Image (cartoon, rainbow, N blue to C red):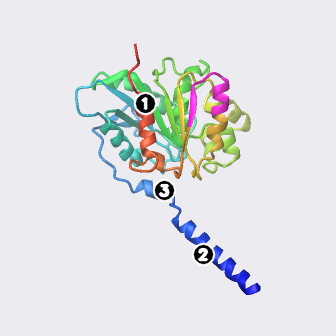
């Protein structure tokens, strides 16, 4: 009896091991950093500081072309720059979309964190109007896409028209956006800080005392800025171990309750980094979602 039981347990362990081996592993950060980095058409400064620039890619043809403002992630840290989204932007441009992948001051850079990170991203987005003077861009079809910490900043861009005039992050005339696609974005900074998403980066991003932190959440955390007033799509991978799924689900419930048009797209067998990797399991849905938001308006 004991011999049969040991045999049965052995078979179960073998089967379990085979199943684990057959389960496809998800991408890691190092895999994303190994992707090709196609050169942009132009690297253009949107401000006087060294990190105030963006990479512009324009499709072949006469245009005018819809524009995607792309905000890279990396936990708002200076260790991660816009380079890892070069393949992502190049693939979108090949699909007929102009891309403006923006760089900005991050934690570890002089002036990074609050308010510099936010003001850079805002100025870079508004600079699309200046790009229109030299490039065939359709200003009626401009949207923003961001990944991870960049997904947070993308949602922030969509909601900053509601920031009070007395706030340090207020902008007089934010560019009008068609919508936002947040790829594994961090939507709730307070919850993220409590759950140590990106370790201590959120606390460092906002800085200051506990009272300052609370005040700054009102104009920096997308969930505290609702309603944003533009369509939003939150794309998540069901195997994401970096940003918890509740960041999307709790945000979606509150946004819908406040009248925003928001939906979640959950991609099976996708982790965190597949969402910005052309050719991955997530890419067809990510690409289709972005292109659908940029379709010309009817009527």
Question: Is 258 inside the magenta-drawn segment?
Answer: yes
Does the segment drawn in magenta span residue 87?
A: no
Q: Earlier in the sequence, mark 2 or mark 3?
A: 2
Q: Is residue 14 above or below residue 234?
A: below
Badge 3 element: loop
- Image-based side of 256 in relation to 281, left or right: right
Which residue is tagged 3? 27
Q: Tell me the crowding category of disc 2: few under 14, some 14 to 19, or many 20 or more residues within 10 angstroms, Cα based.
A: few
How far separated are the C-alphas under marks 2 and 3?
Answer: 25 Å
Q: Residue furthest bottom?
A: 3
Find disc 2 in the rendering and name its residue.
14
Quadrant for residue 205, please give it.
top right
Residue farthest toward the right in the current orientation of the protein = 1
As drawn, 23 above or below 263 = below
Please give the name of the residue rendered at 66% of the width and 31% of the height, measured from the top-left corner.
Answer: 253
Q: Is residue 284 above or below residue 130?
A: below
- Determine the CA span between mark 1 and mark 2: 46 Å
Which residue is at the front of the view, 110 or 119?
119
| Separation of marks 3 and 1 at Cα, in angstroms | 26 Å
Label 1: state its secondary structure.
helix
């Amino acid at each position: 009896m004991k011999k049969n039981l040991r045999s049965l347990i052995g078979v179960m362990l073998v089967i379990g091991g085979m199943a684990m081996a057959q389960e496809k592993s998800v991408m890691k950060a190092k895999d994303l950093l190994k992707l090709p980095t196609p050169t942009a058409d132009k690297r253009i400064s949107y401000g006087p500081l060294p990190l105030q620039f963006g990479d512009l890619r324009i499709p072949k043809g006469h245009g005018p072309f819809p524009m995607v403002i792309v905000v890279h992630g990396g936990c708002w840290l200076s260790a991660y720059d816009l380079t890892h989204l070069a393949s992502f932007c190049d693939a979108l441009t090949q699909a007929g979309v102009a891309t403006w992948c923006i760089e900005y001051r991050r934690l570890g850079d002089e002036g990074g964190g609050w308010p510099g990170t936010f003001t850079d991203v805002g100025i870079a987005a508004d600079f699309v109007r200046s790009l229109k003077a030299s490039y065939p861009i359709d200003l009626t079809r401009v949207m923003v896409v961001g990944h991870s910490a960049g997904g947070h900043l993308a949602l922030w861009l969509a909601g900053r028209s509601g920031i009070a005039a007395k706030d340090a992050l207020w902008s007089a005339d934010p560019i009008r956006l068609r919508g936002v696609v947040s790829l594994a974005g961090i939507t709730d900074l307070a919850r993220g800080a409590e759950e140590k998403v990106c370790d201590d980066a959120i606390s460092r991003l906002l800085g200051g005392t506990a009272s300052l932190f609370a005040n700054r959440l009102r104009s920096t955390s997308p969930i505290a800025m609702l309603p944003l007033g533009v369509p939003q799509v939150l794309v998540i991978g069901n195997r994401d171990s970096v940003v918890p799924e509740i960041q999307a689900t709790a945000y979606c419930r509150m946004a819908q309750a406040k009248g925003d048009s928001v939906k979640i797209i959950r991609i099976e067998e996708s982790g965190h980094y597949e969402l910005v990797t052309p050719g991955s399991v997530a890419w067809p849905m990510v690409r289709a979602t972005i292109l659908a938001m940029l379709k010309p308006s009817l009527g």
